[in-house]
Image (tube, coloured by chain):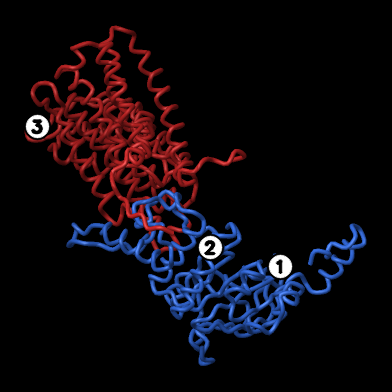
Amino acid sequence: MSQTPKKAFSPMNLIRRPEFGALIGALAVYIFFAFAGGSAFTDLGGWASWLNVAAELGIIALPVSLVMIAGDLDLSVGSVLASSSMTLAIVSGFYGLPTWIGILAALLFGIVVGTINGIIVTKTNLPSFVVTLATMFAVSGITLGLTRLLTGSTSVAFNADQPFQNMFGIMLFDKFEVAIVWWIIVAAVVSWVLYKSIFGNWIYAIGGDVVSARATGIPVSKVRIFLFAGSGFGASLVAVIQTCLYNSAQVANGQSFVFNSIIAVVVGGVLLTGGYGSTIGVILGTVTFGIVNQGIYYTGWNADWAALILGILLLIAVLTNNTFRRLAISGGKKEKKND
Amino acid sequence: MTKATPILSLKNVSKNFAGYQALDDVSLDIYPGQVLCLLGDNGAGKSTLIKVLSGFHEPTSGTVEVNGVAANFKSPKDASNQGIATVHQFGGTFPLMSIGRSFFVGAEPTKGWGPFKYFDKKFANETAVREMQALGITRVTDGDRLIGGLSGGERQACAIARAVHFGANVLILDEPTAALGVKEAAHVLRIIMTARNRGVAVVLVTHNVSHALTVGDHFAVLIRGQKADDFAKGERTREQITDLMAGGEAMEELIGELNSLTGSINVIN
């Protein structure tokens, strides 16, 4: 039993981290599109293009990643985005109330739907997949129905008051959405929660083994409800940003975020089974998504191919994550063959 | 090892599950600094008994006493508040968490003030590693390693270290050696002795008579929910215990039957 106090940097440790795959993925797609897309992709305009997409997705994907690390899924983010966006446009655009009231209502709406998701999931013990699928449809139905009832249309115009326009809906240096700043703020908050707060430890524990987590006295239901509320908030924040930026709200906005957020999170190394994941990984996953989604336009090829690349990346990511999980659990030892 | 007050005892405890008598009038005393081995075949009631001890089940009749005072455990939380900790077969339950993080799940150490309080990872890692090393697991030096990367014995050690660190004075170990290899099992037995020597009362549930004889101070054998025998170290031979566990005559009958089929299988012994 020899004492080997080694905590030195080793490349093996780096490779074994799940973010490593996400880093390789992000670099690979960047290099690929840098060649295929040329200088237009690698200059400032190109960066703005994929950063804008990544920022909006990232604001949703980061809180969703916490939900997923705790072992749940949230499919309702797309509908929440649409209805929060509609809430803002109807309150402050259609009825002409001050912008801050509309924004507050929109953000509250996201938090409320998230909380309802959380309460239903924890009270019924149904899979969150089904519960949030149900709220996704229900919320989208309410939005469509109420919007038509109140405004007689499915698209509502809106103009934010100047300070809010500057906060949510301007372009920095003519190219970069202010959403990028919000993305950085959300990333900082989510990182702090996950790595630094006690709450973060609870998230990992709940995702790892919910029964044992409960036995140690963690308020499991409260934590899960809070996380769903957080992902609702993320979706409604993007709703506010989009509505201010585009000066209107459409009922069909945002559904693409449902699966895109899951892609970003999984490509970022979060296990679908929960219990493991990192903020850096999710940011890298989101960047990868942004690069593929926008890079395709610089290549001159049909944009349809982007989905194929994303599909392949997702599959590779899931396989890598799975292998990582097996290795981590077996302590890096070789698998038994009959496993 | 005084025979003062038992730290935990069962007084005429019975447990009935919808007509099935899982425990029948069992009385048992557990003393600090002693290892009580709970022996018995599958379905003899060992699991039910430790679930009563750890607050998962309330007895149908009879009482559980802590330091001579009746304790009505309504939940495992009640029992753990009294210093009774249970470690299950696979020890660490959060394979993808680091040693330091999982060691302090639900009781995280913090630094800082107010809303800026943060998880003290350095303290958590150092404490977890130190406590494991104190139990003889010197191979573990990095609290950032994942629980899943530890061997079965190390995971048990981690779980036992955790229980001891959080002030457990009764440690209930449910088949801790069952899934382990010979060497690992020996290590876990050594850890049990370390805990015992620190004055912890240990309840060891096992199938393995050798393991029980190695560390046990006191033994109780359960058969079909009843306490068939209760004796101190050295009062019974290994054969007597094995016979008891298998239900006495049943084992002899079986050996006789096998002998008639295959010739004597006891030649080697």
Residues under numbered marks 3 and 1 in contact, where contact means CB atoms less than 8 Å apart: no
Residue A39 coordinates in the image, percent (x, y): 18, 12
Instruction: Determine the residue positioned at 71% across, 81% down.
Output: B236
Q: Which chain is blue in the picture?
A: B
Instruction: Determine the residue positioned at 36% across, 44% down.
Output: A67
Q: Chain of mark 1?
A: B
- Residue that carries the numbered disc 2 in the rendered image: B88
Residue A79 visible, this angle: no
- Residue that carries the numbered disc 1 in the rendered image: B41
Q: Chain of mark 3?
A: A
| Above/below status of A310 relative to A22 | above
Residue A85 visible, this angle: yes
Residue A275 coordinates in the image, percent (x, y): 41, 47
Q: Earlier in the sequence, mark 2 or mark 1?
A: 1
Q: Nearer the viewer, residue B242 or A63?
A: B242
Residues under numbered marks 3 and 2 in contact, where contact means CB atoms less than 8 Å apart: no
